[in-house]
Image (cartoon, grey):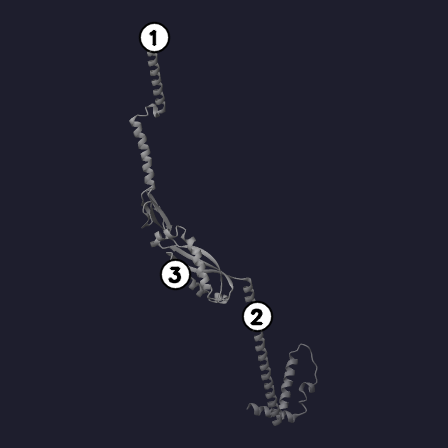
Amino acid sequence: MFMRKWICKERRIEIAGQQKLRGKRKMMNLKAPGGGSAGNPLMRSAIGLFFGGTALAFSGYKSLYTVPGGHRAIIFNRFSGVQEKRTGEGTHFCVPWIEWPIIYDIRTKPRIVSSLTGSRDLQMINISVRVLSRPDENNLPFIYRRLGVNYDERVLPSIVNEVCKQVVAKFSAAQLLTQREQVSRLISRNLIQRAREFKINVDDVSITDLRFSKEFVHSVEQKQVAQQEAERARYLVDKAQQNKRSVIIKAKGEAQSADLVGGAVKNNPGFIELRRIGTAKTIASTISRSNNPVFLSADSLMSGLVGDADSISKAMNYSQSRYS
């Protein structure tokens, strides 16, 4: 009896263990994809191929880089740092996760820098300079180590201010206006030399704006007005002198004419009669062209020439002797 109970108990324990084992197997079958076992070698191979292909594709994508037109690239290595080799335009290869490219734009870029400086005569002047610059293609690793990618923002404002203050201090405010070309040439020469120290090429420098203080502009305007007034006064003086000379010359001419007339009257009394005849001709010509009727006596018209035949003959003889 006792043996039978013990066998039944063992049997129940065995059945319970088998049920637990079947439950565990069902759970494993539910967790495995596709209803198969998680330990299936084919499934493991498929998962490994998937992740391996993804990693390989991503590595291939990261191993290629493109340099656009007008750009150059340098390579930074995680172990050795910046490489001296430079790559040009196009698609290139690098080791992923160990090397990556640093791309520079080597095209000429404009930049306007303003500087407030003083002239030789202590006038404050606001000068604006337009600079065309680009990095030196052969010294890109040096530029990256010293200045980084935004090299122009770090260098150009400071050196342009320095050069402008140095050059403008040599000229007065008036010379900056009259000798602008020379000032621009000096700024360009000094700025090119200064930028070479940072491996930057400056292609062109031009002065775009010169602004003076309001007091200086007002004084210049007042000076111009004073100069114009002085020129006008000088013109009036010259005009008065010319009028004086003309009056003197006219008086001399009239005096000489009077002397000549007096000599002619003295030498020949018929000269007066000749003048009377000319005056009578002038009066007759004026009256004949008039539209209004005029009545004059013969004595008034001829100016008393009728009653003096001897004087008329003398005047005619004098006229003939003068034009013969």
Give the number of the disc on residue 193: 3
Mark 2, mark 3: which one is toward the viewer? 3
Residue position marked by numbered label 2 in the rendering = 226
Q: In which image quadrant can residue 289 be found?
A: bottom right
Q: How much space separates mark 2 and mark 3, taking CA atoms?
A: 44 Å
Q: Are marks 2 and 3 in contact (CB under 8 Å)?
A: no
On the image, the x and y values in percent for residue 47 come to 32, 30
Relative placement, left or right, of 305 versus 231 is: right
Relative placement, left or right, of 230 versus 34 is: right
On the image, the x and y values in percent for residue 99 come to 33, 44
| Circle nearer the N terminus (1, 2) | 1
* Residue at 41% over, 57% down: 132
| Circle nearer the N terminus (1, 3) | 1
Q: Is residue 83 above or below residue 265?
A: above
Residue position marked by numbered label 1 in the rendering = 5
Q: Amino acid at mark 2?
A: Ala
Q: How much space separates mark 1 and mark 2, taking CA atoms?
A: 139 Å
Relative placement, left or right, of 210 versus 301 is: left
The one of 8 and 252 positioned closer to us in this rendering: 8
On the image, the x and y values in percent for residue 95 come to 31, 43
> Dividing the image into 4 quarters, which one contains the N terminus?
top left
Q: How much space separates mark 1 and mark 3, taking CA atoms?
A: 110 Å
Describe the element under mark 2 as helix, strand or loop.
helix
The one of 314 and 43 positioned closer to us in this rendering: 43
* Residue at 42% over, 60% down: 205
Q: Are marks 1 and 2 in contact (CB under 8 Å)?
A: no
